[in-house]
Structure formats: C-alpha cells, structure tokens
Image (spheres, rainbow, N blue to C red):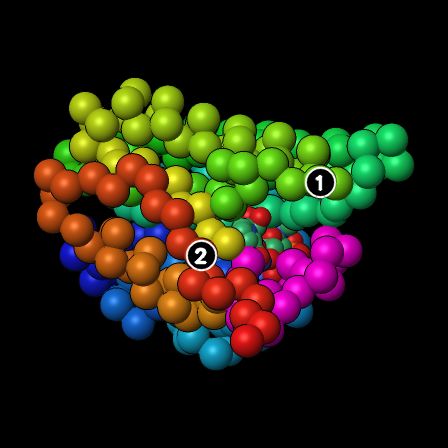
Amino acid sequence: MILNNKIAIVTGATGGLGSAISLALISKGAIVYAIGRNAAALERLRSNAGERVKPVQLDLTKEQKVTEWVSNTFTENHYPDVLINNAGVGTFSKIDETPSSKWHEMIDTNLNGMYYITSQVATMMKKKTTGSHIINIGSILGKTGRTEGAAYCTTKFGVSGFSEALYIELRHFNIKVTCVNPGSIETGFFKSSGIESHSNMLHPPDLADIILHVLQTPDNMLINELTIRPLNPKAPVR
Ligand SMILES: NC(=O)c1ccc[n+]([C@@H]2O[C@H](COP(=O)([O-])OP(=O)(O)OC[C@H]3O[C@@H](n4cnc5c(N)ncnc54)[C@H](OP(=O)(O)O)[C@@H]3O)[C@@H](O)[C@H]2O)c1
C-alpha cells in the first residue's frame, strides 16, 4: 500500500507505541485518526504532528460510543484504509490476588474494545475497491505464558486467535490482517503494569518502522504474523 493520503486509525495513540506509529504514518503522508482517552496527550500529539492528526477522545470499552464515532466519521468517500489496534492495558498479579475489576479491564480493553472497532471498520473496508490493512498489536505474551500474567496472556492469546481467523475471513476482500507480537518496549506500560522494566528494551520508533514496512508490502503479499524481541532482554553477565 502507498500510504500517502491514506486514512488510518490508530488506537492507543497517546501511548508510547501508538504515538510512534502515528508519527511514522504522518511522515508518509497519511491522515491519522488518533484515539485515546487522555485529551491533553492527544493535543500534544496533534501539535507535534500537525493537521494530519485528527485527535479522537474515545474510550474503546464503550461499544455504543465506538459505533457512533465510526458511523459519524466515515462515509462512502471517506472510508478507513488502515486500522492499527494498538490500545492495551496490562497488570500482573497472582491469579488469587487479581481483583475482578482488573481482569475485566484487560478483557474489555484488549479484546472487547478491539472487537467493537474492528467489526465496524471491517464493514466499511469490505465495501472498498482498493486494499485495506488491519494490524493488531499482540505480544510475545500471546505466544507464551508468564507467571502472574494469566489475564494479560488470555487477552494477547486472544488477539492472536482473532487475527488468525480474521486474515482468513477478510483476505478475499483485499483486506490484510497482521498480528504483531512485540517483546518488551520502552513505554509507559511498565509504570502502569507493575512489572519490572530493563535496560535493553525495544524502542517504539524502531517498531513503528517495521509496521510501516508491513503496511507498504506489495498488494499480493501478506505478513500475517510477526514476533519482534530484544536480542538481549537483559545485558548478559560476562
Ligand atoms: N510495552 C511493552 O513492553 C509491550 C510489549 C508487548 C506488547 N505491548 C502492547 O503494545 C500496545 C501499546 O502499549 P504501550 O507499550 O505503548 O503502552 P502505553 O504507553 O501504556 O499505551 C497504552 C495505550 O492504550 C490506550 N488505552 C488504554 N485503554 C484505553 C481505552 N479504554 N480506550 C482507548 N484507549 C485506551 C492508552 O490511552 P489513554 O490512556 O489515553 O486512553 C494508551 O494510548 C498495547 O496493546 C500493549 O499491550 C506492549
């Protein structure tokens, strides 16, 4: 896909990875609907990136609000070409010490929120004559378990299954679906999740470059899954 003047939606655009992806898309001439709940952070992104960023203050866990926003924003001559499902939350704790509110928050954001927006956007993408691309940000914790990560792993294994089924369902409509599974990334995620960061994490702009590459592959080439890790998650002791 050639990204110039394409219409993209990036969820979680106020966070570390989402804002890097938004800036990368803007650098290629795309228009980015940047979704998050934090109005001040959305405004910062718009003032950094300019008028091609369209800030959207939206809580993805609110199905009705998501449906209204999609149908009020997009019309037949203005359908989204790219959807980056990046918004996500994670907290880590023993299963018998995980409050049900945290379990529900992760399921509601990482799975239900992704479903609400994708199901609406897919209807529009199916009507387009040109190609479209949905990229879902999973995690390496969608491929392997981690102690104290039952809820988060459940959601990220879910993102992987969702992506795998969708690419098979949507490929005949010229819609590509890719699941990107990163290892640890240097973002605010570590402050909110309660797990320890380390000094050799991936950097959001580097991942954004990979995502741009995936979006710009030839029309008949689909990279449906990608796992990206730090080579050395912690500096080795020599
Ligand atoms: N950091 C890592 O090591 C790592 C590793 C693998 C995968 N991931 C995944 O990468 C993605 C991006 O995370 P990040 O590392 O960039 O973390 P982050 O900086 O904490 O960003 C998370 C983003 O999700 C948004 N969000 C959360 N709940 C939302 C809701 N209900 N409605 C709308 N937006 C919501 C936040 O925006 P608001 O607060 O403004 O709503 C924020 O923009 C997530 O899916 C995460 O699971 C992260």
Q: Position of residue 13 (x, y in %)?
A: 52, 59
Amino acid type, callout 1: Thr
> Which residue appears at 43% of the width and 75% of the height?
49
Circle nearer the N terminus (2, 1):
1
Disc 2 residue type (three-letter): Arg
Q: Residues within 10 Å of mark 2 (few under 14, many from 20)?
A: some
Residue depicted at 55% across the width and 70% down the height = 236
Residue at horizontal 43 percent and vertical 42 percent from the top? 136
Q: Is residue 151 above or below residue 26?
A: above
Vertical position of residue 54 compared to residue 76: above or below: below
Q: Which residues are magenta?
A: 184-201
Q: Callout 1: helix, strand or loop?
A: loop
Image: 9 above or below 175: below
Residue under pointer 2? 229
User: Which quadrant holds the C terminus?
Assistant: bottom right
Tell me where residue 84 appears, x and y as whole percent.
41, 48
Tell me: 109 left or right of 130. Answer: right
